[in-house]
Image: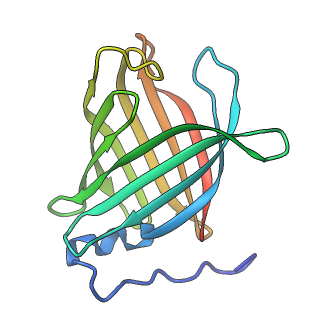
Amino acid sequence: MAGGTPAPVEIPADLPAPLVPLAWLLGTWEGAGVSGFPGQEEARFGQEVVFSHDGRPVLSYVSRTWLLDEDGTPGEPLTTETGYWRPLDGLGLEVLLAHPDGVVEAYLGEVDGAKVEMRTDVVVATESPKDHPGYSAGHRLYGRVEGDLMWVYELAAQDQPLAPVMSARLKRV
C-alpha cells in the first residue's frame, strides 16, 4: 500500500514454530541499492532476494545482484549469495552464506521484531577471493521499514575496520 500502513505479516500454516519470528522475511524481494567499497567508486545495483522454507526449521536464502546504469537498466552481474538462516534457542540466529568468489561466512545474530542484526563468527576464504581480498569480518542489519526490506552490510578487509559497503531497499514482489 503506497503511503499507507504496511500489510500485516502472513504466517503460512506450514511454517515451523522456530521460523515464526522470521516470517516477515518470507517471499521474493526486489529493489536497488548502492555499493561503495573503500577505495572504489560508488555504484548502483539491482537486487533480488528470496527467503523460503521447505518445512524444516530453516530459511533458505538466495540473493542476486547486478550493476545498474545511469538510467536504472540492469547490467553485468555482481554476485550471488546462497545460504541458510537457522533460528537458535530464544531469538538467536545462525546464518551460513556462500559466495561464488571463494568466501563462506558464518554469522551469529539476533531477531528483534522486524529487525535482524548479525556479525560474522567465522569467515573462510579460498586462496584468492578477488572481490574480498583480506576479508576478515562482516556485520549485517536487516529490517522491515514501511513494509520494505532494508539492509546494510559492513565489511572489514585489508587491515581496515568495519565500514559500510552496501545497502539497499527492496520491495516484496
Place of residue 45 in the rendered image (x, y in percent of width and height, measured from the top left)? 66, 42
Tell me residue 100's x, y (percent). 39, 34
49 lies left or right of 138: right
Using the rendered view, name the quadrant where residue 34 is placed: top right
Residue at x 33% of width, y 29% of height: 103
Q: Which residue sits at x=43%, y=59%?
A: 115
Give me the residue at 30% from left, 70% from top: 53
Q: Quadrant where the C terminus lies?
A: bottom right
Q: Relative to 22, is 91 on the left or the right?
A: left
Above or below 145: residue 155: above
Q: Residue most toward the bottom?
A: 13
Residue 44 to residue 92: above or below: above
Q: Position of residue 18 (x, y in %)?
A: 21, 71
Of 13 and 110, the residue lying toward us: 13
Q: How has the structure been colored for display? A: rainbow
Looking at the image, the residue that sits furthest to the top is 159
When asked about the image quadrant of residue 81, the answer is: top left
Q: Is residue 56 left or right of residue 128?
A: left
Q: Depth check: 25 or 108 in front?
A: 25
